[in-house]
Image (spheres, coloured by chain):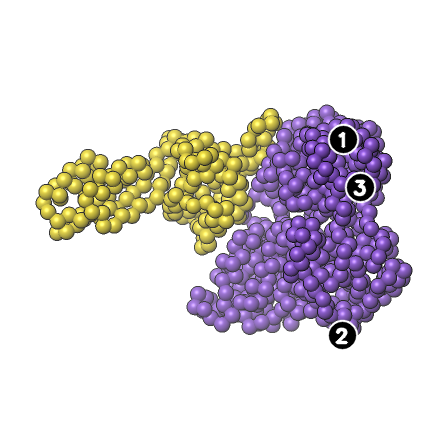
Chain colours: A yellow, B purple
Amino acid sequence: MSNQNGTTPSNVPPQAPGLEMQNGVPTIVSAAGVNVMSGNEKLHTISILVENRPGVLARVSHVFARRGFNLESLAVSRTEDHTVSRITIVVAGDDEAFKQIGNQLLKLIDVIKVIDHTNDNLVGRELALIKVRVDNAAARAEIKQLADLFRANVVAVDPTTMMLEVAGKADKVDAVTKMLEQHEILELVRTGLVVLARGEKQT
Amino acid sequence: MDGAEILLESLKQEGCDTLFGISGGAILPIYDALGKQSDIWSILTRHEQGAGHMAEGYARATGRVGLCIGTSGPGATNLVTAITDAFMDSTPTVFLSGQVASPNIGKDAFQECDIFGITMPIVKHSYMVKNTQDIPRIVKEAFHIARTGRPGPVLIDIPKDMGEREFQGAFEYPESVTLRGYQPDAPAADEQIRAAAKLIAEAKQPILYVGNGVNSVDAADELLAFAEKINCPVTTTLLGRGAFPGGHALALDMLGMHGTAYANWAMHESDLIIAIGVRFDDRVTGNPKQWAPNAKVIHVDIDPAELGKIRFAQVPIWGDAKSVLNQFLEVVPAKTHHEWNARLDKWKADAPLTYEKEGKLKPQFVLQELQKATQGEAIMTTDVGQHQMFAAQYYNPKHTRSFITSGGLGTMGYGYPAALGAKVGCLQGHRPDTDVWCVTGDGSFQMNLQELATGVLYDIPVKIAVLNNSSLGMVRQWQKLFYSKRWSGIDLAKCPDFAKVAEAYSATGVTITHEDEVADAIREAQKNPGTVLLNFLTDAEADVYPMIPGGKSVHEMVVDGSGNKIPVGGWGKTHGGNGNVADIKEALETATSGDYAGEWNDDLKAGQLKI
């Protein structure tokens, strides 16, 4: 809820975990943006805690698809509570459109909680597996050195290829990828970002 | 007991007395169980879409959850329009769809379709039964979700074997639901109510803008009391018709694209909008940036996602209309707005709804006669198009839940089945002794007229008024106004003789062509205990005015076929392009708000303003 025309205080407590009251309206925390995209678009990272049931991911992804959002990344897994799954989504959009998305997500019965991490102190990681063509000892040594530099792990080697495992923020994975492009990248896969808030704050 | 019997027991626990639908292969077990009981009236329709709209009409007329069933595959896909309609208009409904037996799911079995997937974006929630033991819990949750918060449709997809399998243990219906991701509402904060009260106290030209949210919680009494307490004029949306009694001194009738001139002017001039159970739909706001430019907004809605979605609200209040109005009544002191109301009264006198009376039978005249004959006491359902707007303009329902129309989705073919559903609600004792009229058009009626068989077979006496202009009138009107009369896809010539159609279904059919036959025909229909169809042959040139073209502002409002725009507040002594130059100049000079005076002067200079 933007405050362009003045504000009205609210004494309503948050109605459900993950909601914050702004002007008496439950809403997810407004986004300030971490990474400026074209126009008013910013990259938003959100966590959606959902019931661990079939069909939930389809419902959630449809909220984005219907409004023409293209997800930058998506990661889904069970949490410490096996009845709850966590969906972590990175998506570009302007604040107003993003607020709509948050409100619509909260309307889904199977969505328990929506958290916008834009202002959070986070640990964020993604994992990449990168397979490169390596057919001589010199190249093998060079790539091993590169892996050490980035604290990446060599997880598979055979006479013609090597596979690296890189964990970190997206820019680190990008940097490793860029360096490896000097060799022939055969295949690459990334998990998408997962995040947790630091300290006692619940994500 | 098997799963189907458990399902029916669960439905009875929810107080269901009626189910609309059509049988079929995958729901044989459920129809078998239905045939063995008599608590639930199973109404066999002629098309699943009709069944869906009947469930909607039943729900809208009674406030109870409408229940509908269709078989797998085409039975289920035929429900899709009705489900979407219920979703758009927040109608509490539960749709049961048959599904092929569990082992066949995903194998392209006969009459298999993924209705669970198809309907995902158009339901409030949906279930696929995977275990017979879950049926009571699912039914309990489905009804809870359908009727609470912002109501809506819930789908339960039931594979055939789930209905056949024996239920283990004794039937026990759950007493409560646990849905941690669902909080339908919350009490509005006192502080918000006080903030609203402060704005109301400061306002000089407030307006109550109310919609379906008032009807759906039966808050018409509270609204009336509140409007009178703060002496505030009331305008209703299309779905809000009946929330405030027509003819009341404070009633400004409908606003928006085809709303009254005085309602739209009042909205434009207002300094405070008290919006209750509305969503600032584009058919109301036109261009939201130019809409009500001087007003602050108090927005009350049961769905927090609606608050501030289109228009920023200085005071958003999350809550249901009834509770919040009761809080307002406690906190907000009485006040008066004599000057404001006097101005509105003048506008009402200056720019009433009007129409060209020369020539063939006018649809507006028919609606005026219906209003006279029913005194606004009847439930009226409509289809979609010109007749719908005429009905909304000229029929003034006295009671809540008495104007039942497809607003959000705009579903042609809605009206007659919805009327049947509403009348069934009456026959079941929820609205005893209430007449039900369906006002429809020749285009709309042909989209579901097969349900005449249902109406006659079950003796559900609905009166049908077909405003028959042998064309898709609203599309024709737009082609006339915006496409230089390039008629395309609007000609319904060679319509069947609807009176004969009615006779073919063993109902009564009468064709009316002249004004002087109208009142008698309506009176005869009222006396007739059965289904009556009145086929009014009306003037195809009779268009709906006033009109604000889509996406435009109140400054673009035209009041008649001349295309003349009319400034806010009217021409002065007269209206509708009859004013003389002096009147127009006076109107321009005395205009109090906005930047339109400049625009109008420019128009005058450019010679574009026809006088």
Where residue A75 sits in the image (x, y, percent)?
A: 37, 45
Where residue A111 sits in the image (x, y, percent)?
A: 49, 45
Q: Which residue is drawn at 79% across and 60% down?
A: B538
Say whether residue A110 is visible: no
Count of numbered badges drawn on the protein: 3
Say whether residue B286 is visible: yes
Name the foreground residue: B135 vs B88: B88
- For numbered disc 1, what is the local secondary structure? helix
Name the foreground residue: B580 vs B18: B580
Q: Mark 1 against mark 2, which lies toward the viewer?
A: 1
**Residue placed under numbered mark 1 in the picture:** B588
Q: Mark 3 lies on which chain?
A: B
**Residue placed under numbered mark 3 in the picture:** B577
Question: Quick one: which residue is furthest to the left in this view?
Answer: A137
Q: How far apart are marks 1 and 2 (CA)?
A: 58 Å
**Residue placed under numbered mark 2 in the picture:** B504
> In the figure, B537 relative to B240: above or below?
below
Q: In this view, does A136 lie to the left or right of B349?
A: left
Q: Is residue A13 left or right of residue B549?
A: left
Q: Residue at x 80, y 63 (%)?
A: B537
Q: How far apart are marks 3 and 2 (CA)?
A: 47 Å
Q: How crowded is mark 2: few (under 14 residues within 10 Å), some or many (20 or more)?
A: few
Q: Quick one: label 1 or label 3, which is nearer the N terminus?
A: 3
Callout 1 amino acid: Leu
